[in-house]
Image (cartoon, rainbow, N blue to C red):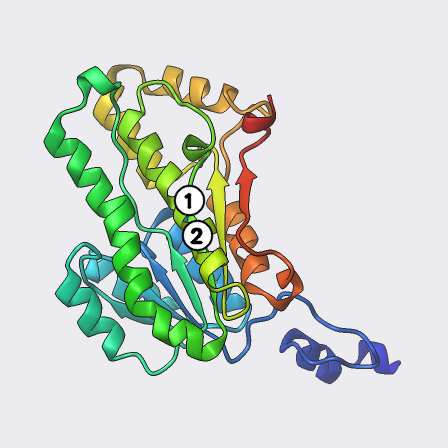
Amino acid sequence: MPARHDPRLQNLERAGVTILGVHTPFRLDGKTALVTGGASGIGEATCRVLTAAGASTIIVDVDRARAEKLAAELPGASALSFDITDQAAVEQNFARLEKLDILVNNAGIGLVGAVAETELADFQRIFRVNVEGLFLVTKYAMPLLLQSSGVMVNLGSVAGLVGVKRRFAYCGTKGAVIAMTRQIAVDYPTQIRANCICPGTVETPFVEGYLQKYHAHEIDKMRQELSQRQPVGRLGQPDEIAHLVLFLCSKESQFINGASIPIDGGWTAA
């Protein structure tokens, strides 16, 4: 059997080992990754993809049962359940971690409404989750990331890059996520890497919940409209976002820092 086709060598290559001058890219063997909002949608897909690449994944979600169920399915994974807007809970949970190489700030909520339609309490809540929550998680993860020369990937949105109708507060939060990502990259240019992914509309429970809440009487019509605002004519898939996260977490992307990368079916190019 030719050495290149020896199953034993192929197994080593899948583990990220260079054999006969061939390197298997995008491996995260030996890395510990934490994903907020990791029990569903893009977060769940990200946990699955990072685990498949060799990472030990920590799934953080307010839905404890769902996080624990997912962790049981993924080799080496574990689950934590806490509210990212609760400073004491965030601090306590990160204090228990011995190691962290990768932080994926994925948790977030949405809100529909133009500025005149937006109530102060709703505006404050979405900023508390999408902006303050990211701040708290990042603040208490930073010592571990600095120790490991780690990587941070923040989930922004096309709504942080362009105006989206009736998304006043949501656009504001995602613009803040992009700005904070760039600022972190400037403050820690050689110690860690921080990048932001800006998805278009992705087929997730998040989007389904929006359709049920605001368009229950016309779900199919609205789903088609959501698909058509991306020039490719469809919604994104969670695993497509997750594989971009994987790339940004891997050493193959080491020259990318402080970037905000659209993954939106051409939305922001149109």
Residue 26 placement, left or right of 127: right
Amino acid on which disc 1 is placed: Ala
Looking at the rendered structure, the kind of residue marked 2 is Gln
**How packed is label 1: few (under 14 Cα within 10 Å), some, or many (20 or more)?**
some
Q: How many numbered markers are drawn? A: 2
Left or right of 46? Residue 118 is: left
Quarter of the image for residue 255 reads: bottom right
Q: Nearer the viewer, residue 149 or 250?
A: 149
Residue drawn at the location 55% of the way across and 48% of the way down: 259
Residue topped by disc 1: 179
Picture quadrant where residue 267 is located: top right
The percent coordinates of residue 200 (x first, y second) are 48, 33
Coordinates of residue 215 in the picture (x, y in percent): 27, 19
Q: Residue furthest right?
A: 2
Q: Which residue is mark 2?
A: 183
Q: Position of residue 42 (x, y in %)?
A: 41, 48
| Residue at figure coordinates x 42%, y 36% from the top left | 203
Instruction: Determine the CA span between mark 1 and mark 2.
Output: 6 Å
